[in-house]
Image (cartoon, rainbow, N blue to C red):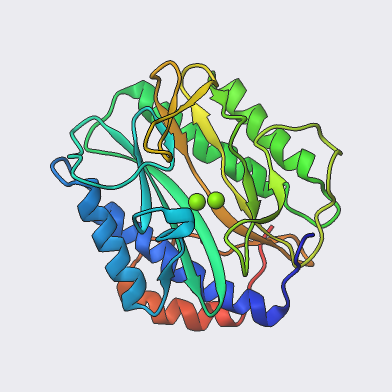
Amino acid sequence: MIYKKSREELGAMRRGGIILADTLNVLEEALRPGVTTGELDALAEGWITGHGGIPSFKGYRGFPASICSSPNDVIVHGIPGPLVLEEGDIVSLDVGVLYEGFHVDSAWTFPVGTVEDRALQLLKVTEASLEAAIAQCHPGKRLGDVGHAVEAVAISGGFSIVREYVGHGVGRHLHEDPQIPNYGSPGRRERLTQGMTLAIEPMVNAGGSATKALADGWTVVTADGSLSAHFEHTVAITEAGHEVLTARAPAAASSRLQRLAGAAQAGTHG
Ligand code: MG
Ligand code: MG
């Protein structure tokens, strides 16, 4: 069952999306060699709760932290803690915010200091695969078009797609129908219609696509130890196309209220 959101419900998700986007901006500013993933988690939790939100992930099926932090060969669901990030690492930070009764979900993979060209290329291609998927988000297109767009960009970039973990609808629940694989055939699966809100999240590996779950019950790594990147946005399907509810504006905290006021007037893109 796919739950479509009303204009009012989209307003709540838009406001939550601004808090989430700002959280990622705050994390990016704090990210440097020597910081621990636990420190980033505390920072995110403080920012989210300080703006009236609730971290979606904390306590979700027993998850012990407010964000997922997934360095290097960790694909998704890494648990923040004493791990010190070092120059040359990459780290995926995945954040969920519950605000006014609705969840939004977004992730970004950052370089820590200067990283190798291959790692930088992986980040660029994974972000581009998300952009290509979002470009498919119009009423009348299908989920197969979205998945195919991700896969095409990742494969042509020389990388592989994770198949065991998928994107999802998002709203009153963190995970709603439909499932959104990062592969697919154009013109197949569910048709996109106005009011759908989708968490689209390419997970792209530098090596093979195989994954392995660690004994902590959460952390998922690449089976071959290769680097992995993860970019995610919550996207609403609108009458005219789509709106990226978790879009990251360059300026962070100071302009938040301005953007909130601007966003209330609603702009659709694409
Ligand atoms: Mg996420
Ligand atoms: Mg998600």
Q: How many marks?
A: 0
Residue visible at 27% across and 69% down? Answer: 46
Residue toward you, 125 or 181: 181
167 relative position to 137: left or right? left
Residue toward you, 256 or 164: 164
Q: Position of residue 187 (x, y in %)?
A: 86, 39
In the rendered view of the protein, which quadrant contains the C terminus? bottom right
28 over 88 or under it: above or below: below
Residue visible at 74% across and 60% down? Answer: 241
Please, which residue is most extreme toward the left here?
34
Q: Position of residue 150 (x, y in %)?
A: 64, 35
118 over 110 or under it: above or below: above
4 relative position to 119: left or right? right
Q: Position of residue 121 (x, y in %)?
A: 43, 27
Question: Residue 192, located in which quarter of the rendered image?
Answer: bottom right
118 relative position to 2: left or right? left
In the rendered view of the protein, which quadrant contains the N terminus? bottom right
Q: Position of residue 123 (x, y in %)?
A: 43, 34
57 over 222 or under it: above or below: below
